[in-house]
Image (cartoon, rainbow, N blue to C red):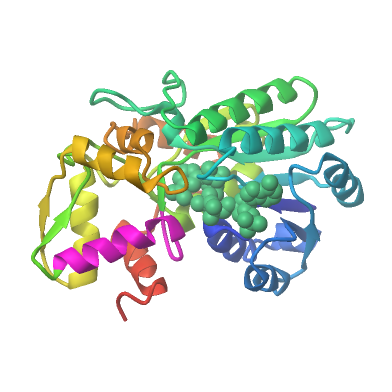
Amino acid sequence: MRTLVTGGTGYLGRTFSNILDQDPEIVNGGITYLVRKTSNPEAIKRLKSKRNAKTEECSLLDIGGLEDVLKRGNYDVIFHLAAQVKGPNVYENNTSGTRNLCYALSDRQEGPRLIFVSTLATRCLEEDGAICSDTPYNPKTDYSKSKQECEKIIKEYAKVGILPTIICPPAIVGPYDAEMESTYRLIKATGKLGFALTLGDGKNRISLIHADDLSRALIAAAHSDETIDKTYVLFDPTLENYTMQDYVRDIARVLHGKEIKVVGTPKKLLRLAAQVAGKNVMLTPKKIDELTSCFACDPAEIEGFREDISWTWRPREKIPNGIEACAKSFGLIK
Ligand SMILES: NC(=O)c1ccc[n+]([C@@H]2O[C@H](COP(=O)([O-])OP(=O)(O)OC[C@H]3O[C@@H](n4cnc5c(N)ncnc54)[C@H](OP(=O)(O)O)[C@@H]3O)[C@@H](O)[C@H]2O)c1
């Protein structure tokens, strides 16, 4: 299986590349990681050190370069993890990158498999409920709008030969989650004063998935033809009735080794702080609306996916272990 991975230098890419390295069929076929001139050199070095792996330097925004990379590699499967998760032009960059990738793949007679990592944020709920893959779209931020549009682009290209699977994960828990570092540090600091802050009242139900479990699911999806043209919502179903408050409590427990009181933060105050912080941070006013929405999922989704991959995968990592790995990666605990 000749394999191309986009986004290998990112947070999920780090765990994904470690897990991919354990799949003999994929390793034997050779793995190419798409990196950019501006990617972190340490991350590129780490990817190059994987078994039977190499890198190709090209941005997804460079259509000509992308066509050359894809012609050279003639890949059987593409794991498309790359995305801009915040900052300016996030919508344009993500949709152009995915469109370029699909376009460059579409001249093949027989379509390659395309495993696309979308996000559950495309489908969050205003009221309590349970999300499944056919829940109507409800993106709140430019980022989640871009992922919705990427899903649409991929489905259009499926008509001309690409064989896609779309996976929508909730927040991914694992080591080196740069976007969560400031949250962990805040919980570490306030925990010393005896409390930890949650967003709004924190009673909204959410889902999470461990980075190892998601990585294994992406690989399992690529190994099964039953997943072609399907969209899956994947999460850890053992976290039943889990709320944002519970997540903050679990992070605080890992950081402080004891129970810490979780205190709500008025949404109005959060929105004001986000407005002052500007656009280049994760916690924008729209993101606050998103993070206080319901992200609970329908457990039937997991069973549907498991059936399509002949029961070769199930979530098996404990979320608190993922939180611990994340805290350790920031040097916040030993
Ligand atoms: N983190 C979560 O909790 C979460 C939850 C749900 C879904 N997701 C999805 O999971 C995927 C991975 O997210 P992440 O958290 O790992 O993000 P991340 O750490 O920000 O990594 C993003 C990756 O995308 C690459 N990239 C961005 N723009 C690119 C372009 N124009 N051309 C080539 N590569 C480009 C980056 O390359 P550089 O190293 O060069 O910047 C990096 O490797 C994304 O699709 C995201 O939407 C994440």
Q: To which quarter of the image does residue 76 belong?
A: top right
Image position, residue 221 (x, y; %): 60, 42
Question: Going by the image, does 262 lie left or right of 1?
Answer: left
Image position, residue 95 (x, y; %): 65, 32
Furthest toward the bottom, the residue is 334
Does residue 44 show up?
yes
Image position, residue 153 (x, y; %): 67, 25
Q: Is residue 174 magenta?
A: yes
Q: To which quarter of the image does residue 14 belong?
A: bottom right
Which range is magenta?
173-191
Question: Going by the image, does 64 lie left or right of 226?
Answer: right
Furthest toward the front, the residue is 276
Question: Going by the image, does 311 lie left or right of 285?
Answer: right
* Residue shown at the point (79%, 26%) measured from the top left: 161
Give the dominant element type of the magenta stretch: helix, strand or loop.
Answer: helix
Q: Nearer the viewer, residue 275 or 124?
A: 275
Please give the count of numbered marks on the rendered protein.
0
Q: Is residue 195 magenta?
A: no
Q: Nearer the viewer, residue 284 or 123?
A: 284
